[in-house]
Image (cartoon, rainbow, N blue to C red):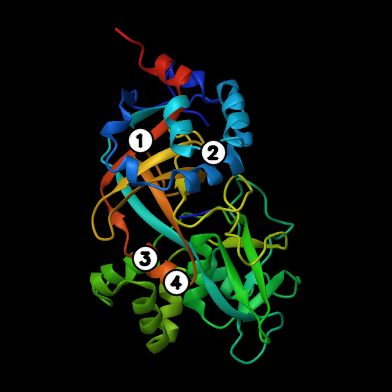
């Protein structure tokens, strides 16, 4: 689950989402034709269909069940989507925004020693939902020491910080083995961006507020760097994930592995989890492709808002960090649902 972000309000939206949430303005819905989707015919629809079938069965709305059954038998993926789904733009009165996330790789060890001084903690038993827990600064000062909660120790505080932001990662151990960790809980404190604080204080130019830039600054200024990281009082706890192979992506919000460049995190108040979503991302490295809503994030709010999963490791991290673009999201909905949302006449 991406931590950097079900049903939407409105009488018509409640037809296919399970919970009503008050909004300041009703969302608007517009049906499109497939020839209005930019470069629709150029995508690898079979790749999207494979990812769709991985999580389709988790959609509880009855209109989806028969489509999930048909999906696993399809040999013509593009025709399947065009035959059973209608493209719908959901407008929540905000401009579209695409960002990116990734699964970081960290160097670590199962025991503290040498350069491995920064713990990755399991969820404490004393943590209670809705009750603020110790802050990042208090935890760094030893609030959880001696409780045996350490999953591993890593060699860099900035990498550990970004593991908290991404919510999952791989920790490479001496000898070549690795363990996977995923989001378990957080401490209930307000999230504040350490990179933004560095920029606000004039310590790092905006253009250098990348993982690499911040890592270099903290390395040169370890004491003050620690305080900057602690500006973000929010703290994430993890669980070790043993069910994933090395080739699979991390677990998403549906508790299933997500797929690089095919899975996105969305706001489930507006976008049905598990639904196909046509993404038209502009800016640098622009692309158009069919993706699947399989994750959420605390910073992902609005109908035209998505976080794109770029994959694992530093290359994926660089691409994710370079992504903040406009564009358009179009949700593919079962025809029956789309017709209820935008009735003819």
Sequence-earlier tag: 1 or 2: 2
The span from disc 4 to disc 2 (Cα, nearest Å) is: 50 Å
**What residue is disc 4 on?**
229
Q: Are marks 3 and 4 in contact (CB under 8 Å)?
A: no
Residue 75's tag is 2
Q: Position of residue 11 (x, y in %)?
A: 44, 15
Local secondary structure at mark 4: helix
Q: Is residue 24 left or right of residue 163?
A: left
Label 1, label 3: how far apart the Cα atoms are: 23 Å
Q: Residue furthest front?
A: 75
Alpha-carbon span between mark 2 and mark 3: 32 Å
Q: Is residue 202 left or right of residue 103?
A: left
| Label 4 – label 1 distance at C-alpha | 37 Å
Q: Which residue is mark 1?
A: 330
Relative placement, left or right, of 318 versus 296 is left
Q: Earlier in the sequence, mark 4 or mark 1?
A: 4
From what the image shows, is residue 212 above or below residue 17? below
Looking at the image, the residue that sits furthest to the bottom is 114
Residue 46 coordinates in the image, percent (x, y): 49, 45
Cα separation, mark 3 vs mark 4, equals 23 Å
């Amino acid at each position: 689950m991406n931590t950097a972000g079900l049903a939407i309000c409105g009488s018509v939206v409640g037809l296919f989402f399970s919970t009503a949430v008050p909004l300041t303005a009703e969302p608007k819905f517009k049906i499109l034709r497939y020839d209005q989707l930019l470069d629709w015919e150029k995508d690898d629809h079979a790749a999207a269909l494979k990812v769709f079938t991985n999580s389709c069965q988790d959609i509880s709305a009855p209109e989806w069940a028969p489509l999930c059954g048909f999906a696993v038998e399809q040999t013509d993926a593009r025709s399947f989507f065009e035959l059973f789904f209608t493209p719908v733009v959901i407008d929540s009165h905000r401009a579209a925004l695409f960002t990116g996330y990734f699964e970081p790789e960290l160097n670590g060890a199962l025991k503290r020693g040498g350069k491995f001084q920064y713990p990755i903690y399991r969820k404490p038993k004393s943590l209670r939902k809705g009750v603020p827990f110790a802050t990042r600064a208090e935890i760094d000062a030893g609030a959880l020491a001696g409780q045996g909660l350490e999953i591993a120790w890593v060699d860099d505080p900035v990498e550990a910080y970004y593991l908290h932001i991404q919510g999952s990662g791989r920790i490479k151990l001496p000898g070549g083995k690795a363990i996977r960790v995923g989001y378990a809980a957080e401490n209930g404190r307000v999230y504040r961006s350490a990179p933004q604080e560095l920029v606000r204080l004039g310590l790092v130019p905006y253009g250098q507020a990348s993982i690499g830039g911040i890592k270099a600054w903290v390395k040169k200024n370890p004491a003050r760097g620690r305080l900057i990281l602690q500006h973000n009082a929010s703290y994430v706890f993890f669980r070790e994930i043993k069910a994933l192979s090395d080739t699979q992506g991390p677990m998403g919000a549906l508790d299933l592995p997500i797929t690089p460049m095919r899975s996105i995190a969305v706001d489930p108040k507006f976008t049905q989890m598990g639904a196909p979503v046509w993404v038209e991302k502009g800016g640098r490295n622009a692309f158009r492709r069919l993706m699947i809503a399989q994750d959420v994030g605390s910073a992902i709010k609005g109908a035209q808002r998505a976080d794109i999963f770029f994959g694992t490791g530093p290359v994926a991290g660089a691409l994710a960090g370079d992504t903040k673009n406009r564009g358009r999201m179009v949700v593919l909905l079962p025809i029956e649902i789309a017709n209820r949302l935008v009735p003819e006449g």
